[in-house]
Amino acid sequence: MSAAGGPVRPRLRDRVAASDPGLLRLTAGLRTAGSIALSVAVLALLGTDLTHLVAGALAAMVSTFAIREKQRGRQAVTLALGLPVALASMTLAAALHRNVIAGDLAFVALIFCAVYSRRFGERGTTLGLIGFQIYFMSLFVGATVSGLPELFRSVAVAFGCSAVVRFLLLPETPTGVLQRLREAFRARLAQLLSAQLDLLDAGPGEADRALEQVREGTARLHETALLIQGRLDIGAADEAEARLVQRRVADAEIAAERLGLSVLRARGAERVDTLAMHLPGAPVPSGGRQPVRDAASETLRRDLQALRLLVVRPVDQAAGASVAHVRNRLLGYRDEENLPAAAPPVQDVFRAVGEATRAVLGLRIALGGAQDEADDSPATARSREELDAEDAVLDAEEETPAEEATGLRRPTTRAAVQVAVGSALAMVGGELLSSDRWYWAVLTCWIVFLNTASTGEILVKGYRRLLGTVLGVLAGILLAGAVGQHTLTAFALVLLFVFAMFYSAPLSYTLMSFFVTAALGLLYTMLHTYSLSVLVLRIEETALGAACGVIAAAFVLPVHTDRRTNELLATVLERLGDVTRSAVDQLSGGPPVELLDEARDLDKALADLRAATQPLTHPGTPLRARRENARYVVALLETCAYHARTLGATAELLPTHPSIAADPRLRGAAGRIAHNIDAIAAHVTDEHAKDEIETGPSIASLLGPSGPGTPRYGRITDRVLRHLQRLDEGVTGLARPLGVPLRATDG
């Protein structure tokens, strides 16, 4: 059993790590459910009645999920500050319990302050959230002044239990989270390599699905890279280590993406548009549907499997002679003379395998893995020397802080006004529906504004919450009948649903809303206030709250989806231009700059744009042409970003790789790309702009013939020209969907 079980555990661990990078969702679910269970257990031992048990459970949930800071010390301070905020909020709700008008006005003022406090960072956001949620909890349990001592005890116990679970039972350190994220990156990289191998082998009926899996794997790998980026500043030992890991993760991500594109070309579609790797639903290009079967392709399959084995091998495990032999063979493909005799597209995959192996080696070294240099071949030794030289030139640059908006232009101020107005509408409408449970409408209005920035995003979030609520009500009806008066069973199910709520939250807001409503139905059952009419009222109040949120977003200081996406699109184009100019300038012989930070800024801007276009690309939108246009633009931008990142990665090799020579002619040849990016950005920010897109001959032809003393184009130069050409085509392709006029130039 041990022999058979040995490989099973690592595979299971890798699968869990890949499905939940850093175990962030698992930790959030376990912490919240654990805090509730511990609070209820302590309060039950103190002889607390059921109503105050529920109050303690809700306070434990809030005090756990509200804290988002990453450093343990800051978490402790925020949790300590949250307790007096919670007690003050509860006192206010109890004091105004019987004064409807004063209570409503105070609640609106509290909501405004809670949202406005987001401008003060994570701690301000947390304290505002605690203040709002505890006020809501006080309304839910019917807090009165005479009952405050008992409620104070319940809330204090809840905060204490939350601290015990967070810092003692389920501790989480920045270093530990970063380590788990690294493991998740490695596991997802292995999954992507498996998907690429499946794409190589897929038959005509399987190719499109295999390509979609490669797209998904590439996106998941990119998501994990961004998570690592966000944790490096506090999880790494020092800044040097942070920048080293950042670079090696970026190298591995770029190498894996290039390998996937090379595999697609190797299927027979030599002229594959990179867009096929980024446009969801796009089929395998014509000519690339049949897998290749010959000696070279069989060797390629073997080497892709070997590369995957190198990735899944634990970082701290020594290689041994057999693993070193495989690594040496794969790194040898970086030299032209070691490439097998095959068609050019297949040879390009072997090159990509060599570069990916180098990236894996660099990642392993950066993560502190065993060096095992004894069996290095000359190609492996050279790769290590290159990596060491690159590490030596890492340099940090100061970031220029962005200019902050003021007044009503500040997002937090605008959101505070919008939520306050929407909540006031929800109060009025909610009390018309029910004088006892009107606060459900206010809660929904509050929630639809969380992490949204435009009317369209609020509309989509409101729809998802309503859908989850309806499904949760149906589940609540079934569970209430099944559980009946079995309080312990109901409580166990509540804990299960709370765990599922926070585990599923980053994946599906609809699913999260389903678990919230199902748990609520069980709470009503435990409090002996369950009825079908109560759950139906929950749907009505949810619909009303979502509608009030949308109305407030649409008519009070509105940020329309078009405006929001245009602002983000302009930011993406600006970042794309920055990366392109810096990379080309360095490839042309200019001074070295920190391209990695610029590339990550581009990735972040693109992620923001992708999230903001969800209302436009939602399957339920009636504007199908607009939906397809938005998807096409985002896919084109992702394609452009890939080529820009690759140019940046190549440019960073110049100071440490004598075999790569700068070519001053690139600066002039790539000038058209920079001009076109600026022209598109001008039209995005000003619809009356007169700028035009320039088209003309290929980038390579613009360089002109090689003169005396000019290095002949090598494989690296050809790769640079290919990425520049694809970038030029991608930027030009943005003109049609964005309505930018073209101006042909003479070739």
Image (cartoon, rainbow, N blue to C red):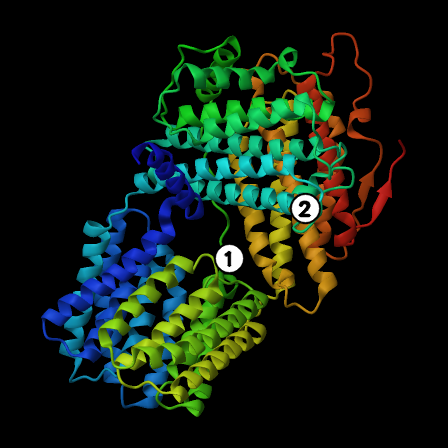
Q: Quadrant of the C terminus?
A: top right
Question: Residue 668's image quarter?
Answer: top right
The CA span between labels 1 and 2 is 46 Å
Q: Nearer the viewer, residue 219 or 552?
A: 219
Q: Is residue 359 above or below residue 529?
A: above
Give how far across and how far down residue 570 sits, in percent: 64, 50
Q: What residue would you read off at disc 2?
A: 208
The residue under the point 31% across, 81% down is 524
- Residue 400 in view in this figure: no
Q: Is residue 416 above or below residue 92?
A: above
Q: Report helix, strand or loop for mark 2.
A: helix
Q: Is residue 728 above or below residue 365?
A: below
The three-letter code of the residue at mark 1 reads Ala
Q: Nearer the viewer, residue 47 or 722?
A: 47
Q: What residue would you read off at disc 1?
A: 405
**Is 156 positioned to the left or the right of 323 in the image?**
left
